[in-house]
Image (spheres, rainbow, N blue to C red):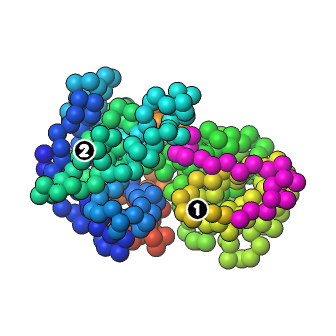
Amino acid sequence: MKVTAAVSYGPQQAFDIVELELAPHQAGEVLVGLVASGVCHTDLVTKAMFAAEVGPMVLGHEGSGVVEQVGSDVVGIEIGDHVVLSFDSCGRCACCAQGKPTYCSRFAELNMPGLRADGSPTLTFNGATVLGSFFGQSSFASHVLARPSNIVVVDRTVDLAAIAPLGCGVQTGAGAVLNVLRPDSKASFVVFGAGGVGLAAVMAAKAIGVETIIAVDLVAERRDMAIGLGATAVVDPADGDVTGAIQSLTGGGATHALDTTAVPAIIAQALKALRSLGTLAVVGLGQAEVTIDVLDLLGGGKTVRGCVEGDAIPQEFVPQLIDMYRSGRFPLDNLITRYPFDQLNQAVADTVAGTTVKPVLLF
C-alpha cells in the first residue's frame, strides 16, 4: 500500500516527505494507521550518526494510532484497537524471560538495522529498499507494520497524540526514576538535562513525592518548565560550580542522579554531585567513553547504572503512566508541542534551538 513518510538521506539534509510503498503485513505483524508520533532525541542522533552510511531511511519510534489489519498469527490485538508503539524484543532470551526486555539479546537486531528480522524490507521506493522497521515501527510515516511485542493496547478514550511519547522518551525518563532509581520521599534527586527525558523524570519524581528535585540545564525556559513540573530548585551550569550548588541544595550531595545528556564531562560531574552511597543512572546516547574519578566512586560507595528505556515492560509501564496522566499526577500536556506531520523539519529545528521540548507530529 502507498504511505506518506519522511525519509532521511543524510545528517545534513532535511527530512523529505514522499510517498513510499509499504509491504503487506506478515502473519505475525499488525498494520497501524498512525494518529501521532513523538520526535525523540534518538531519532536525531541516529540521523546524525548513521543515515549517511546506510542509505535512505525512515526514522520515528514513538508512534500511536489505530489498528487497521491484523496478521493471522497475532493474538490479543484487534482491528480498531488504539495502540502506543514502543521498542521491539524477542520475548525468548534470558533477559526477556526475566522480565527485562530492554536488555533483549536481539535488541539491536530487532530495532536498528532497518529491515525485518528475516532480512526483508517493509518500505520501498520504485522497487528500491528504504530502511524502515526502526524500533520495530518507523513511525515518521502515515502507516507502519509492528509486532505484538512492541504494541501496547490502550483505552480508546485517551488522547493518542498526548500519549505517543510514552513509547520511548517519556518512558525512559519516568522509568529511570520509577523502575531503576526508586527514590523515597526523603530522597534528593537531580537530573542533568531538562529536555523531554529529563522533564519526564522530574514529573515522575514529583508524582511519588520526592522531597528535593533539582534540574540542571543551560536553557532558562527549560529550567522554568522544570519548576512548573515539580522541581524544587534549578541550576544554571553557566553560573559555575554545579557540584557545589547541588551539594548546598541537598545538604551534602544528592542521593540519586540521572544524566540525560551523554556528555562525558557532565556524567563525571553528576557522579561527583552524589553523596556517599548515591546512585547515578545514565540514559543518554552519545560518546562511547567517559572518565570518572574511581577514588570518588570507591570511597563513596557510589553506583553508576546504565538504563535502557527505563527498564520498562511497555505493556505494563505505559498503562501505568497513562493512569498517572489521567489522574493529573503526570501532566504530559505541559511537555509537548503539536505539529502537523509536514512540519517535521520545523519541529526538529525548534527542538535543536531549545524552544520545543517534546514535539509530537499529527497525521
> Tag 1: Cα neighbours inside 10 Å, few (<14), some, or many (≥20)?
few
Name the one closer to the observer, 333 or 13: 13
303 magenta-colored: yes
Examine the rendering and report whether any part of residue 329 can be seen.
no
Residue 120 has which mark? 2
Please name the residue shown 53% across and 40% down the image: 103
Which residue lies under the disc numbered 1? 288
- Name the residue located 54 percent from the left edge and 54 percent from the top edge: 197
**Residue type (three-letter) at the residue carrying disc 1:** Ala
The image shows residue 351, relative to residue 98, as above or below, that is below
Marks 1 and 2 close (CB-CB < 8 Å):
no
Residue at horizontal 58%, vertical 53%?
Answer: 283
Earlier in the chain: of badge 1 and badge 2, it is 2
- Range of magenta residues: 291-311
Question: Seen in the image, is 151 located left or right of residue 248?
Answer: left
* The N terminus - image quarter: top left
Q: Residues within 10 Å of mark 2 (few under 14, many from 20)?
A: few
Image position, residue 16 (x, y; %): 24, 66
